Image (cartoon, rainbow, N blue to C red):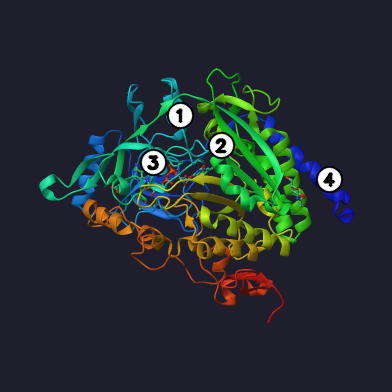
Amino acid sequence: MSKLYSDKTIFMKIGISNIILSILIFTAESSPPQDPIRCSNKTFNCTVINTYGSFPDRTICRAAEVVYPSTEAELVSIVANAALLNRKMKVATSTSHSIPKLACPDGENGLLISTKNLDQTINVAKSSMTMTVGSGMTLRELISKAAEVGLALPYAPYWWGLTVGGMLGTGAHGSSLWGLGSAVHDYVVQLRIVTPAGPEEGYAKVRILESDNPELNAAKVSLGVLGVISQVTLKLQPMFKRSITFMEKNDSSLGDQASSFGYQHEFADVSWHPSQKKVIYRVDDRVATNALGNGLNDFTGFRSTPSLVVAAVRSTEEIQESTNDANGICLNAATTIFTLKATAYGYTNDGIIFKGYPIVGYQNRLQASGSCLNGIQDALITACPWDPRVKGLFFHQTTFSIGFSKVKGFIEDVQNLVNLVPKALCGIDIYNGILMRYVKASSAHLGKQEDGIDFDITYYRSKDPNKPRLYEDILEEIEQIAMFKYGGLPHWGKNRNVAFLGAIKKYRNVTEFMKVKENYDPNGLFSSEWTDQVLGLKNGITIDKDGCALEGLCICSQDNHCAPRLGYFCRPGKIYKDARVCTLSAKR
Ligand SMILES: Cc1cc2nc3c(=O)[nH]c(=O)nc-3n(C[C@H](O)[C@H](O)[C@H](O)COP(=O)(O)OP(=O)(O)OC[C@H]3O[C@@H](n4cnc5c(N)ncnc54)[C@H](O)[C@@H]3O)c2cc1C
Ligand SMILES: *[C@@H]1O[C@H](CO)[C@@H](O)[C@H](O)[C@H]1NC(C)=O
Ligand SMILES: *[C@@H]1O[C@H](CO)[C@@H](O)[C@H](O)[C@H]1NC(C)=O
Ligand SMILES: *[C@@H]1O[C@H](CO)[C@@H](O)[C@H](O)[C@H]1NC(C)=O
């Protein structure tokens, strides 16, 4: 071990801690994320991209035009015009936080319908505790508008910068096994969606779906292929308080405890650091509203970060990756985790300072965060850590849910891989490890099929698509173990292409979904090449070309899918022999 702690690495260790500290205290001019839609001629000749500035295949998406309706009536006339012309459409949001190419319309003449101005609160019914909002409202606004009238959304994603329509589109969720579970779409009690129609109905119509309408099960997780959701009514609860404590343990019994822990605490989740063999359990429950405390969640990873600092973090990672410096990465990761822990991940007891656990506070201050959304456009002195306009974090995300009956097997497979290659998963700890969140079976046709755990793995992506990552093979093997050995369901808004291979066959009610699609949009005007591929209507989810496996665009079957010139060849997995992964090895 002592060799590991050379002068250089100690310097590095201090350096990284300072970086995280300065992230924590820096509050100067920040820039919210850029507008994902840009046009060269007012609202014509546009491009659309996700928040990371890169789709999985690194292409840029074009659209002929963008429109910004602010009322449902405008929406109807837009859809009618496009339907009359048989024009392809796509709903685009102000946030565009999905990684896959969900925002791309097909063809030369594609129309983007932005929900940016469909962000109003339309109605609050305090007696029935429901709230109706425009589909472009962000989670942040939703939480704050509900809190103004004493209401709370019980379960939600952890990041403010998503829209209601986008969360429904991709089945976004937080973590809970209580009530109807952690997915926002399972709290929808009414939804209004504008779809194309025949000439006798004026080429577009508004469909109003109530809870008892089986079509709601298609529309509440739709990948955007059914039409434009204009308004959503959500069932809320009276404002309540929570009490949060993060508890660290080793990961020896994680396989046994992961499931039962979820049933013990309403807002439980688990952050797993496999190479360090550590687990952080979130012990998080509802408490009486008179419990003392005004805690605040301002998660460190979602804060505005000085551009110089993220550039330094990224450069360090790039150097360590390109020099195969596994020890350096492990040390970095350990320091990152240590510092995050010491600073309570950005939680405070009162909005100012962390004094100790538990953190007690109101739901609207604890359920999600995203202070890097604040600020002035284009200041760029500080920004969200992944903002593509500055040199910052650039990563892949492999995110899937596995049913409880198989969770233990998956966890043990990952542990066995770590036993074989102990340093292989240090790199993911730079992104706070594997986040494990609880999800419940949903009535949505494209929602979760059974109760289980959603695993969220974030890891280094090279700016050069032909350059492998350190321990390329291990992360590829985990991806294939998750999706193919254990039948994991990919998060629709995250992941690399390979995760979607055969995914649609894992859903029981796809035919029901397809019937609704055929009925609402028979000409597929809201469908695109990507949604057709994901829904199993077209081939081409994977793209065979040199280096494709490195980017998750294919599963390798030949060496040129990896990087043979750099010593990476296509080989079977270490514990899952059906896997085919790019492995650093001597030539056969
Ligand atoms: C920093 C960060 C944190 C995240 N945290 C979480 C998390 O905690 N939990 C989680 O589950 N996910 C999380 N995600 C992923 C995220 O949930 C999805 O990518 C997401 O739902 C995208 O929302 P969006 O509003 O940006 O929609 P987009 O990505 O722009 O759109 C998604 C899809 O929905 C469709 N759509 C959007 N609005 C409508 C509408 N009104 N009518 C019809 N179709 C529509 C679009 O056409 C598209 O197909 C996170 C992502 C990031 C970048
Ligand atoms: C801008 O787009 C409109 C609509 O397509 C077109 O009529 C106009 O000529 C374009 N202007 C330029 C400068 O390209
Ligand atoms: C459309 O925009 C691209 C840049 O995105 C530009 O190169 C091209 O000239 C534009 N075309 C027209 C007709 O304006
Ligand atoms: C893990 O922690 C348990 C107690 O929680 C302890 O009994 C066990 O020995 C620990 N395992 C290792 C490998 O440290």
Q: Which mark is residue 265?
A: 2
Work out whether mark 4 precedes mark 1 in sequence or the reverse, and give the earlier one: 4
Asked if the residue at label 2 sits under 8 Å from ligand 1, the reply is: no
Marks 4 & 1, CB-CB < 8 Å contact: no
Q: CA distance from mark 4 to mark 2?
A: 41 Å
> Which quadrant would the N terminus be assigned to in this image?
bottom right
> Which numbered mark, 3 or 4, is in the foreground of this view?
3
Amino acid, disc 2: His
45, above or below 138, in the image: below
The residue wearing badge 1 is 143
Judge from the rendering whether residue 228 lies leftward or rightward of residue 256; answer left or right: left
In depth, the one of 413 and 108 nearer the eye is: 413
Q: Is residue 93 visible?
A: no
- Residue in view at x 47 percent, y 58 percent: 59
Tell me the distance, in whole angstroms, between the alpha carbons under discs 1 and 3. 16 Å
Residue denoted by label 3:
186
